[in-house]
Amino acid sequence: MSGARILVVEDNVINRRLVRDILEYRGHEVIEASTVHEGLSLIHGHTPDLVVLDIQIPGGGGEALLKEIRQDPQLSGLPVVAVTALAMRGDKERLLRAGFDRYISKPIDTRAFGPTLEACLDGRGKHHGA
Ligand code: MN
């Protein structure tokens, strides 16, 4: 699909800009947040098709935000992709078990990033006409 609305929740300005540039270049609309609270607010206000979620963000971390999303029946189909520099053995499994659709490790592979996210969008219900 093209033309998805993607929410990027990331507190690092440089990483956020990188992700935005990649996704906008691929024709997606990008909205940005840097904290759990801000992210939740944008999810409710702007109904994104997918959320890219940094694990280390202020306000409780990406896992806290994921928990809010997964507890809301109206957001049950929303794909959420974890992006993190965590590299401990077991982290990936823990995050997938927590309910993330995918796990992408930093530094981001700029070529694979877009296609990986788009794979998460395919086959999901779309909120917006493409
Ligand atoms: Mn961070």
Image (spheres, rainbow, N blue to C red):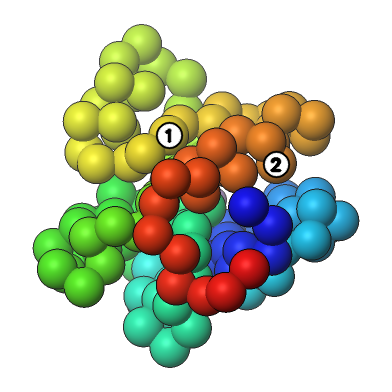
What residue is drawn where x is 25% and y is 27%? 94
**Who's the residue at 36% across and 83% down the image?**
44
Q: Which mark is residue 3?
A: none
Looking at the image, which residue is at 37% across and 23% down?
92
| Residue at left offset 79%, top offset 61% | 27
Image location (x, y in percent) of residue 2:
69, 57
Vertical placement of residue 88 versus 51, above or below: above
Q: How far across and down, in percent of the image, does residue 23 sit?
A: 74, 55
Quick check: is the Cβ at mark 1 less than 8 Å away from ligand 1? no
Q: Is residue 87 visible?
A: yes
Q: Nearer the viewer, residue 48 or 17?
A: 48
As helix, strand or loop, the secondary structure at mark 1 comes to strand
* Three-letter code, disc 2: Gly
Q: Judge: label 2 CB < 8 Å from ligand 1.
A: no
Q: Nearer the viewer, residue 124 or 78?
A: 124
Name the quadrant of the C terminus: bottom right
How far apart, in angstroms, are the residues tagged by discs 2 and 1?
Answer: 13 Å
- Quadrant of the rendered structure where residue 29 is? bottom right
Q: Which residue is label 2 attached to?
A: 114
| Extreme residue in the bottom direction | 45
Marking on residue 102: 1
Could you say where residue 17 lies in the image, as x and y percent from the top left?
78, 59
Q: Callout 2: helix, strand or loop?
A: helix
Residue 51, position as x, y percentages in the image:
48, 58
Q: The disc labelled 1 sits on which kind of residue? A: Arg
The earlier-in-sequence mark between 2 and 1 is: 1
For label 1, the crowd category at 10 Å Cα-Cα, with few meaning under 14, some 14 to 19 and many 20 or more, is some
